[in-house]
Amino acid sequence: MHCFYVENSQISENSITITGDDVNHIKNVLRMNIGERIKICDGEGKDYYCEIASFEKNQVIADIMEIKETESELPAKIYLFQGLPKKDKMELIIQKSVELGVYEVIPVNMKRCVAKIEDGKKEKKKLERWQSISTAAAKQSGRGIIPKVHSLISFKEALAMAKEMDIAIVPYELADHIEKSHEVIKKAAEKKSVAIFIGPEGGFDEKEIQLALEEEFDTITLGKRILRTETAGLTILSILMFQMELNN
């Protein structure tokens, strides 16, 4: 069944109005007919199972037949606090983390970040690009929500934000004790909100780790190999996704 995303303003009590590029896609690419069934997501966790009722000039009207809570989301909200990487690595991280079930992505300016965003216009343009990548990845993977990509924040701001969550995990190259790390992951999989901190290419500064430990964040190891920044986050997300869905 084909799936489309709309804003809440497009949803009425009994019908949904589809606008924009999806109209052409439904009419001229998919060549769908009145009466055919489609799924429409509000991007916030609800799926609307509909039938196409009519075709207007710039709209498709769909009658709502059934409403369900989305079944494609993880039982917990995972927030990825990603140290700002170089070049276009952030695009890959956003795309794949959304596919794996992340709830929000928060770029963080850490001490060893090589990449910098100093111009306000450039930051706005990058953020728009990152959000469009999140939207496309969510649609491709059948997500029930569109994960938000935040503006760049400082490490201290990230710590304050993560303190509001049930647990915060920091994969760290100098951490050891794989058994302890396994226990932390199992504990995190039972929580409702999880923060994951990933360092940039140069890793975490020792003072950043100390600040995280002072906030009682859990440092873990992901194994004996040193992973790239774009690999580390996807690794822990994959492990958490599997454990959460196993529990569920």
Image (spheres, rainbow, N blue to C red):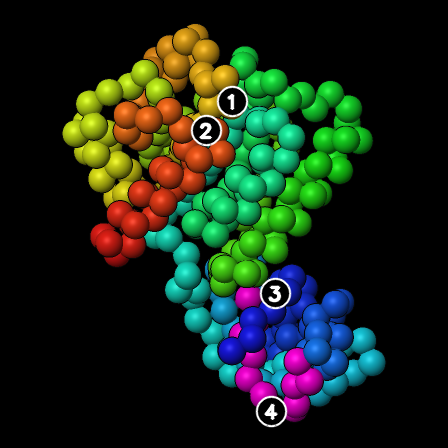
Magenta segment: does it hold 115?
no
**Residue 228 badge:** 2
Which tag is nearer the camera, tag 1 or tag 3?
1
Q: Amino acid at mark 1?
A: Glu
Q: Which residue is most to the right?
A: 57
Q: Earlier in the sequence, mark 1 or mark 2?
A: 1
Compared with 220, 34 (above or below) is below
Q: Earlier in the sequence, mark 2 or mark 4?
A: 4
Q: Which residues are magenta?
A: 30-41
Query: Against 21, is 75 above or below?
Result: above
Query: In the rendering, at what x and y percent does residue 96 appear?
Result: 50, 46
Q: Amino acid at mark 4?
A: Gly
**Cα distance between the residues tagged 1 and 2:** 7 Å
Q: Residue furthest front?
A: 225
| Residue denoted by label 3 | 5
Q: Counting residues from the N terminus, which is met first, the one under dot 1 or under dot 4?
A: 4
- Residue 35 is marked as 4
| Mark number, residue 34 | none
Q: Is residue 58 left or right of residue 204?
A: right
Asked if the magenta segment contains residue 34, the reply would be: yes
Graded by Cα atoms within 10 Å as few (under 14), some (14 to 19) or many (20 or more), the crowding at tag 1 reads: some
Q: Are marks 4 and 3 in contact (CB under 8 Å)?
A: no
Crowdedness of circle 2 by 10 Å Cα count: few (<14), some, many (20+)? Answer: some
Callout 4: 10 Å neighbours few (<14), some, many (20+)? few
**Discs 2/4, front:** 2
| Image depth: mark 1 or mark 4 in front | 1
- The amino acid type, in three-letter code, at marker 2 is Arg
Quadrant, the C terminus: bottom left
